[in-house]
Amino acid sequence: MAKKYDMTIGGQTVATDDYIEVRNPANTDEVVGLAPVGNNSHVNQAISAAKDAFATWRKSSDEERVAAVQTIAKVCEDNAEELAELLTKEQGKPLNGNGSRFELGGCAGWAGYTSSIGLSEKVLEDSEESNIVMQRHPLGVVGSITPWNWPLMIAIWHIAPGVRTGNTVVIKPSPYTPLSTLRMVQLIAEALPPGVVNVVSGGDEIGAQLTDHDDINKIVFTGSLATGKKVMACAAKRVTPVTLELGGNDAGIVLPGTDVSQFAEGLFWGSMLNSGQTCGALKRLYVHDDQYDAACKAMVEIAQAIPMGDGMDENSILGPLQNKQQFDIVSNLVNDARDNGAKVLCGGDPQGGNNYFYPVTIVGDAVDGMRLVDEEQFGTALPIIRYSDVDDAIAAANGLDYGLDASVWGHDKDQLADVAGQLEAGTVLINKHIGIAPHVPFGGIKGSGLGVEFGQEGLEAYTYIKVINAAA
Ligand code: NAD
């Protein structure tokens, strides 16, 4: 019998009558554990516990908040191996490489950094007429909704700034990867005052119930554009503040005259991190005519050398896609590109069986308008598009309804800066792709989201501004 995991509400472990099996995407015959299927009553209990806890936590001192977030970092560190193994089994990413251990390192690192920054009062005027001070205060109960690609890191991205600023949190993990979040929150909750952090698992409807609750004072959502729109529409009912970190279809442009061999590793990992299941991964690569063949060749060589396999095997560097839905999306997009004249240069032919492995697939002769280029593939397939005019490549890069990251690659610093200035995205990278860090604000424009996470600006998003304006 597989191990049962439970929800944590108000510092208590809460079981349900109903559990679902969570299966290993590297071998779907293996049941990793049983996840509780919560219902509306659990959502209400969790929000009520968080609201009760907020009455006290809002009055906590800055030192207490710093200590709490340092504790979160320590919990992630002390339990890294247990959580990494659980994460690998339910998510598929390898323990090794930029996989589960890396993700747990990120959790501790993000929480540690978040504990080190804070919010101070700002004097806006101190004159003979007025003394005006701007303060920042916690909003209340934060409803956090997370996806399945980096479930623990994203959970910490929501929990740490929430707690640091004096809020309490109810988190709802993705139904595809609930176990590691249930366990991590249980461990965190044991170390913090009851009700400061709570977790309710279940289907998508739990997310909808969480966002549509009178006592939720802030929603932080990471997931797809389609769901983000629903979350925002629901938030509009009560004018609840939202942060939305949504999908991306990041373009990279390799400039004319670039020595591609110098950047091939960076391009490859910018695209294939976490088997391509990363919001800010490179998802379409524009290469100038002169370097096109060299770029395709270099990417194929790396693709064929990277070991993909069961994440519990220390030799695996890439794992399977996480779920059947994602496997089908990637398969359909690659097949559609092939049917429409693109060349599958490597991969594109999954072996089948009880798993969601999709080989690293480099697709040449891709063109704008192909679904693989225009839609977010979120997996191990990269289309490479040929261009001859840099302005056309910039226009194509900016042409979709996404704007998370974009990158430009080359040697001429002035030209790199010029192109970077013209790319429309929340983050533009030069000679690298994916540059997230806890001190650097990160967010998307257009369909990629609203607001930022990380750094001072990310922390401020968990507060409201109160101005005290006194006559002198
Ligand atoms: P998803 O939108 O399907 O699900 C995300 C979460 O929303 C899940 O927990 C789900 O249960 C919940 N949900 C579903 N319906 C809901 C509703 N009506 N109301 C509230 N919650 C609801 O996304 P996914 O497939 O889990 O994740 C992949 C997507 O996430 C990709 O598009 C990826 O680019 C994006 N993503 C973005 C970032 C970022 O920081 N910008 C990071 C990671 C992933």
Image (cartoon, rainbow, N blue to C red):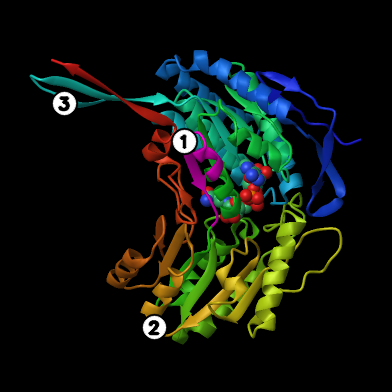
Kindly identify the amino acid type of the residue bearing the numbered disc 2: Asp
Q: Which residue is mark 3?
A: 125
Q: What label does residue 389 carry, if any?
A: 2
- Looking at the rendering, the stretch of residues picked out in magenta corresponds to 233-247
Q: Would residue 195 be visible to someone looking at this image? A: no
- The Cα atoms of the two marked residues, 1 and 3, are separated by 30 Å
Kindly identify the amino acid type of the residue bearing the numbered disc 1: Val
The numbered mark, 1 or 3, whose residue comes first in the sequence reads 3
Image marks 2 and 1: residues in contact by CB distance under 8 Å = no
Q: Quick one: SS at disc 3?
A: strand
> On the picture, is 101 further left or further right than 249?
right
Foreground mark, 3 or 2, reads: 3
Quadrant where the C terminus is found in the figure = top left
Q: Which residue is mark 1?
A: 239
Residue 314, compared with residue 263, is above or below; it is above
> On the picture, is 347 further left or further right than 75?
right
> On the picture, is 311 further left or further right than 156?
right
